[in-house]
Image (cartoon, grey):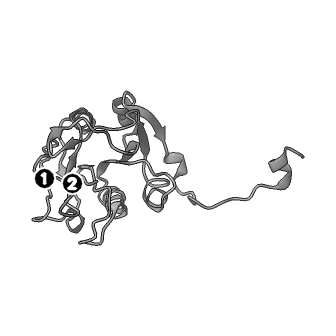
Amino acid sequence: MTAGRVVNSQSTDWCTPPKYVRAVKRFFGGEVALDPCSNEWSVVEAGTEFRLPERNGLQEEWTHHTIYVNPPYGADRERGTTIRDWLSKCAGANKCHRSEVLALIPVATNTRHWKEFIWGRATAVCFLYDTRLRFLVEGKDEGKGAPMACAMVYWGELYEGFADVFLKFGAVVDIRPLHGKAIGERTPLRQPELFGGT
């Protein structure tokens, strides 16, 4: 599955459903400055859009104040990239340019890309109530749901605003307390704690 990129000749572009585009724009104060993985059917209508093959969003600078990303979910074998590369750019744009960044991605909390670029780096996650999110397929509402749960991830300074806008769409979790923590490493429990002893 892709969003804004063609991975192979049989792939399709899966675009963000309008209700989420409206929420993203509301959170950003009315418009999106950059959509780095746009396509000809996108309804995001960002001020700046990067589209393959003309402009590869991973090779461009993300210096815009507000950025919305619906990245390709699969591997792009031609370019040797995965969703991990897109999430790295999201976290980097926030860290280096103080960009406010939202990304609509599959829930895969145990993966390396979540551990490296979301847990400990992002501000919040909205785990969407739509269990099978209906993307627009090449601009049309085909009535098919995504085969996985999805989340809206946020990197930025406006947690309260994010929670206010996205709480109606899912469970919003503030993950700022994880900043600076070693994510994915096990801390062994002492035996008495494990078995309830003293």
Residue 33: percent from left, percent from top = 17, 48
Q: Residue at x 36, y 40 (%)?
A: 158
Query: Eyeballing the image, is 197 above or below 4?
Result: above
How many numbered callouts?
A: 2
Q: Is residue 126 visible?
A: yes
184 on left or right of 153: right
Secondary structure of the residue carrying tag 2 is: loop
Q: Please state which amino acid type lies under the numbered disc 1.
A: Thr
Circles 2 and 1: CB atoms closer than 8 Å = yes
Query: Eyeballing the image, is 20 above or below 96?
Result: above
The residue identified by callout 2 is 64
The residue identified by callout 1 is 48
Q: Residue at x 20, y 62 (%)?
A: 57
Q: Please state which amino acid type lies under the numbered disc 2.
A: His
122 on left or right of 144: right
**What is the quadrant of residue 127 in the picture?**
top left
Residue 1: percent from left, percent from top = 28, 53
Q: Is residue 156 visible?
A: no
| Extreme residue toward the right, this view | 198
Residue 98: percent from left, percent from top = 31, 54
Residue 44: percent from left, percent from top = 17, 43
Work out whether residue 141 or residue 196 is closer to the camera in this orientation and state it: 141
Crowd band around label 2 with a 10 angstrom C-alpha radius: few (<14), some (14–19), many (20+): some
Q: Residue at x 30, y 58 (%)?
A: 93
